[in-house]
Amino acid sequence: MILWKSRLLRLFALVRRYPGAIAAFGFVSGLVSFFLVDRHEGFARIIAVLMLVSWVWLMLEQVLRSTVERWFGFTLPPPLLRYATQLIHQESLFFALPFFATTTSWNSGQLVFTGLLGLAALVSIIDPIYYRRLAPRRWLYLSYHTLTLFAVLLAALPVILQIPTPESYKLALGVAVLLSFPTVAGSLPLQRWWRGLVLVGLMAVLAGAGWWLRLWVPPATLWLHHVAVTTQIDDASRAPVQRLRELSVAELGAQGLYAYTAINAPLGLTERIWHVWMHDGVEVDRIALDIRGGRKEGYRAWTHKQNFPPQPQGRWQVKVLTDAGQMIGTLRFRVTDNPVPR
């Protein structure tokens, strides 16, 4: 027992002497975890499970501290626990952030969510802000906990459970709302009998807002590997013959148009996505596709549209959406009256 205590105290002294090493380790290990998942999906479940298990530390920090004191007769130094919590924040955020940075449509509201995650990751490695501005404010610290876990769950659940993005979003949101209970309860100074009703109402509002804002949250494990708008698909290679940004009304009427997407998805995941065809900002068609994950080059799928409005000239978009409406990406092209040279 004395030996273990001596080793813990020695570790604590080393951490205090080199505080920057904690930030560096969290940053590097988080990115390494992402690249292992991205390049070797066989490791994905192991890494994701380890990331989620590490959250047990955050949830049971106080219980662990009192248990060690009761069983082993000494108290873990509070700064050591804070360093461990900070390390988990760093590793979690730098694990999840590359997923969202890869899948974010930067010209949409998804920029806000990914930017918030980036800010949270930055805060986790700047000790003066983390310890002096964030940690002392309990409600803010718990909100920070919840946001980090929400991001990790969005990135990890499709890998662990192989469930579609809408289901993983619902599950991650439910866990996040449940864990936000202490924060919401602590912010209510009410002591009357109807305090419970107000609390339940606020939790319901929080869940509803989280679901409504899902359009601003990138689908962490789905991203476009290759896209094209084309008039012809090579059946042998299952690839577009050419990529078009502009075509004439005559070409459109003669051959129709293919929207080709190769979508990267986790191994074993089956997902329904939608190609939403829009003309000058107005939806004109919505076509469903079922994809399967696992290919490094992405699952290749396309829709072929032949029925166009009488006046198809103008700007077109094909939005690639999940079944829950989260945007994976957008294809853009323009239809003109005049022939387009090839």
Image (tube, rainbow, N blue to C red):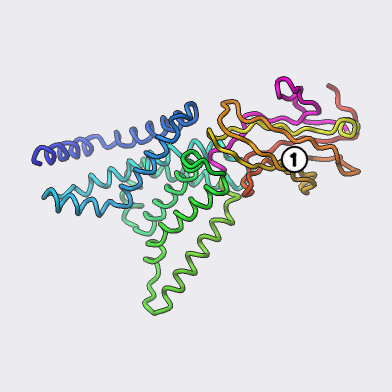
Where does the image place residue 340, in percent across and percent down from the top left? 86, 27
Task: Kindly identify the amino acid type of the residue bearing the numbered disc 1.
Answer: Gln
**Is residue 318 inside the magenta stretch?**
no
Please tell me which residue is depicted at 71% across the width and 24% down the height of the picture.
239
Horizontal side of residue 114 vs 52, given as left or right: right
User: Relative to the observer, which residue lies in front, 323 or 89?
Assistant: 323
Residue furthest to the left: 2
Residue 278 in view of the camera: yes
Of residues 294 and 87, the one drawn nearer to the viewer in this rendering: 294
Residue highlighted by disc 1:
317
Image position of 63 (left or right of 184): left
- In this picture, is 173 found above or below 194? above
Q: Residue at 70% across / 20% down in the picture?
A: 237
The quadrant of the image that shows the C terminus is top right
Inspect the magenta stretch and tell me whether residue 229 lies in it: yes
Name which quarter of the figure residue 213 lies in.
bottom right
| The residue stretch that appears in magenta | 219-248
Mark 1 is surrounded, within 10 Å at the Cα level, by few (under 14), some (14 to 19) or many (20 or more) other residues, namely: many
Q: Residue furthest bottom?
A: 192
Left or right? Give the position of 193 relative to 17: right
Q: How many marks?
A: 1
Seen in the picture, residue 236 relative to 198 is either above or below; the reply is above
| Residue 125 sits in quarter | top left
Quadrant that contains the N terminus: top left
- Residue 183 image point, x, y percent: 39, 61
Question: Closer to the camera, 14 or 149?
Answer: 149
Q: Position of residue 155 (x, y in %)?
A: 49, 41
